[in-house]
Amino acid sequence: QKEVEQNSGPLSVPEGAIASLNCTYSDRGSQSFFWYRQYSGKSPELIMFIYSNGDKEDGRFTAQLNKASQYVSLLIRDSQPSDSATYLCAVKSNFGNEKLTFGTGTRLTIIP
Amino acid sequence: GAGVSQSPSNKVTEKGKDVELRCDPISGHTALYWYRQRLGQGLEFLIYFQGNSAPDKSGLPSDRFSAERTGESVSTLTIQRTQQEDSAVYLCASSPGPSYEQYFGPGTRLTVT
């Protein structure tokens, strides 16, 4: 089992709709969770981070965390063509282990 | 303010040669990380520096890889006797401190021929 799993996609969503991206992780001791957006040929750009169970909203983006189910998601409302990218889920494990473990990413395409 | 910078942006080298990659973190960021991303794959952790503490080298794939950091500034990643499997984008990230969010530089694309 991979440490951080994402559906590789591609996920196609009509412009203006809600895009839902999902991520599961295996380490129950994980403390912090991050979503990065990566355009083709570019480096990852931080979109959201979440530490506590529940929802965290920032503009059109909402991160949702359920530690009991070891599940984190990213919702993108009012999807725009500029949201088309690969979305990487990253997890930070136990205290003292500072590395991020990344999923392989979900490729999202917003259809105009 | 200025983000993380990396140089060179692209590097083509012959198998067996040594290469040195440079990272300049965001000013004031005490933590610095190196990751590797092979084509079509996720990011692999390589090494982590925090202030003057001993670095976490647990992700370095072989003893051909080494990295240094001077205080809380520039870091260099050195790959000796490069192999074709070392071809990847090498990404540097910095953060304000341990357990904070990480911000990535533009990366160095390394091609070993």
Image (tube, coloured by chain):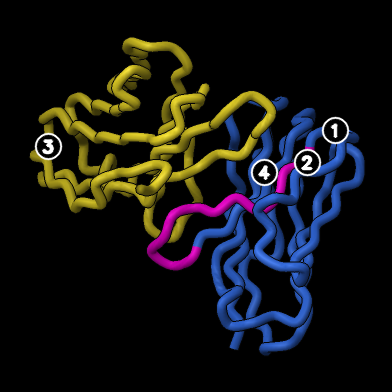
Chain colours: A yellow, B blue
Marks 2 and 4: same chain?
A: yes
Residue A28, percent across and down?
44, 26
Left or right of B52 on screen, residue A80: left
What SS does tag 4 mark? loop
Residue at coordinates 67% horizontally, 43% vertically from top-left? B4
Tell me whether circle 1 and circle 2 mark residues in contact (CB < 8 Å): yes
Measured in 3D between alpha carbons, the distance from the residue under mark 3 to the one under mark 1, in whole angstroms, is 45 Å
Position above or below: B70 against B99: below
Of the residues shown, which amino acid type is indicated by label 1?
A: Gly
> Start and end of the magenta stretch?
B38-49
Instruction: Tell which of B34 and B1 is nearer to you.
Output: B34
Tell me whether circle 3 and circle 2 mark residues in contact (CB < 8 Å): no
State the mark number for residue B4. Answer: 4
Q: What residue is pinned by disc 2?
A: B49
Residue B105, percent across and down?
61, 48
- Nearest to viewer (mark 1 / mark 4): 1
What SS does tag 3 mark? loop
